[in-house]
Image (cartoon, helix red, strand yellow):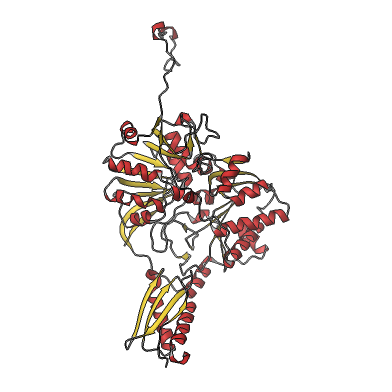
Amino acid sequence: MNYLNNFNIDTIKVIDKSEYPTKGQKKNKITEDIDNLFKELDIKDGYVLSFHHHLRNGDQVTNLIMKQVQKLGVKDITLVASSLFPTNKELIPLLKDGTIKNVVTSYISGELGEAISHGELKGNIIMQSHGGRARSIINGELKIDVAFIASPSSDNKGNISGVNGTNSCGSMGYAIADSMMAEKVVAVTDSLVEYPNYPTDITEDYVDHILLVDSIGLKSGIVSGTTQVTKDPIGLKIAKDTLKVMEASGLLKEGFSYQSGAGGISLAVTSFLRDYMIENELKGGFASGGITGYLTDMLEEGLFESLYDVQCFDLEAIESLKKNPTHLRMSASQYGNPEVSAVVDNLDIVILGATEIDTDFNVNVMTGSHGMLMGGSGGHQDTAAGSKLSIIVSKLFSSRIPLIKDKVDVITTPGTTVDVLVTERGICVNPLRQDLIELFEEAKLNIVDIKELKEYSENIMGKAKPIEKTDRIIGVSEYRDGSILDYIYEVK
Amino acid sequence: MAVISKMAKAGSVESNDILVMISPGDGKIDIEVESIVYNQYGDDIKKTILDTLEEEEVTDAKVIVNDKGALDFTIRARVKACVRRGSVQDV
């Protein structure tokens, strides 16, 4: 349209009849031949390849594709996977032989994380939040050459739906930015359905190729194993006290919004909240995040107006997404991208976990007691920053692994965005939130100073020997806006 | 003095517990520790076991433990129970 500012528009040539278009020949997108597809994709050394994790530990697409890359002898790939699970231990040889150079992810667990902690990557590991990942892809900071989208179902044009197909996963929020921004998009599916495939999570205009495979995953691994309310009396006490904190904050009023993780204590909070809402005839606005059957029940009972769903944690959530019009899909960008208007900014309360927290409320959910990668922010950073009240729930004593430390191993979420810590031995409030301290004192909650609680736990557990690390930096913990919060070191 | 005359067990491998196994030694105290928090607390665990054995006046025993993050009082209780079960008084 370079004639837009051309004042002599009459000088622009009109095409001749002989140049008139014929009816279009539409390209066939489908192939079962992975070798041919890779010839066409022409993946080169140093390419950036992306994957999503909606199939969680049941995913077979990431391993399948990366092994094909290895077979072709391509090196120095940057693997951009929204999360990596124990099943991805099959990629360890690809670190050693240089197929994979860098890893960019939001969560990593299992042996692959341990291998990376032991320094197996030639390049670096970048740990992002879900919102930060979407931000960096959409603003062009992280350029993806090819996005491989594990697709529970697709039609012959590439309309992808997460709720149809044998390996349905529900919402596909983490794959949206990749499908929009990648140079090339490949839908990898085991369920080819009639055109048009709906409801559509990713539409055909974003999809270049469709690769048909025998199986994209194992259903048993797709549904998360963490979605059970805790039966542990200590966990239940923490959940009850958390409800008191929420009530005392004054935020539990008509139309309030809520998010919780899928850990046992967080689910118990949701369960107690449900009882509280029924008893007090309280109706919430939206609940968001990874969605479980507990939340879809509350939606169907009319306790929440709507659900914002970035990923489904169980089969009930997938069923609800199919049938309930107010069970809404959201992309990772809409969820937590700090550069745009995002759902987390409308959140009143979020319930989160922590592996470690320091006396400045900085939280680590990235490395475990051995200092090895075994987690990651996910939406932790995004919701802590966006919500009016971010609450960390955790046991103070859990298998002698210290919760409160002088300094956490790696900062995942900065303490300036964390408001409250609820443990079985008391509630700690960030001194930055004097307003909450006043409200909680009025409600006669058991508030304790986080430094005192640390000393108390050290008296009982003993002071842990620090984790031994080398001086070699293997990666960084990135904040959602792209700034660097902390280094990640190789473990001895 | 408690003499360990037979093999005995106490505790479990549940989270926050410790499984202690004791058997007659070869003239001294011999302790083998396996723990999920070995790097952080391995020495502390060994010391707690040694102190408890000393209190119980055990001088000759082989102790093998599999620790799942037990706190000191749990370790002491399990070691004591093990000594009672494995010593002559108990027969």
Task: Write the residue at 68% across / 49% down.
Answer: A303
Would you place residue A233 above or below residue A104 in this image? Answer: below
Q: Is residue A98 left or right of residue A20?
A: left
Q: Position of residue A449 (x, y in %)?
A: 55, 67
Q: Is residue A456 left or right of residue A140?
A: right
Position of the N terminus of chain A, as image quadrant, is top left
Would you place residue A243 above or below residue A301 in this image? Answer: below
Q: Camera-side residue: A417 or B34?
A: B34
Q: Position of residue A317 (x, y in %)?
A: 57, 46
- The quarter of the picture where residue A490 lies is bottom left
Q: Position of residue A270 (x, y in %)?
A: 61, 55
Residue A263 visible? The answer is yes
Residue A431 visible? The answer is no
Residue projecting furthest to the bottom: B1
Position of the C terminus of chain A, as image quadrant, is bottom left
Task: Write the residue at 32% across / 58% down.
Answer: A118
Count numbered badges in the picture: 0
Task: Write the residue at 46% across / 90% down.
Answer: B91
- The quarter of the picture where residue A271 lies is bottom right
Q: Camera-side residue: A451 or A142?
A: A142
Q: Position of residue A247 (x, y in %)?
A: 66, 57
Task: Write the residue at 61% across / 58% down.
Answer: A269
Would you place residue A457 above or below residue B52 in this image? Answer: above
Residue projecting furthest to the front: A214
Q: Camera-side residue: A472 or A330?
A: A330
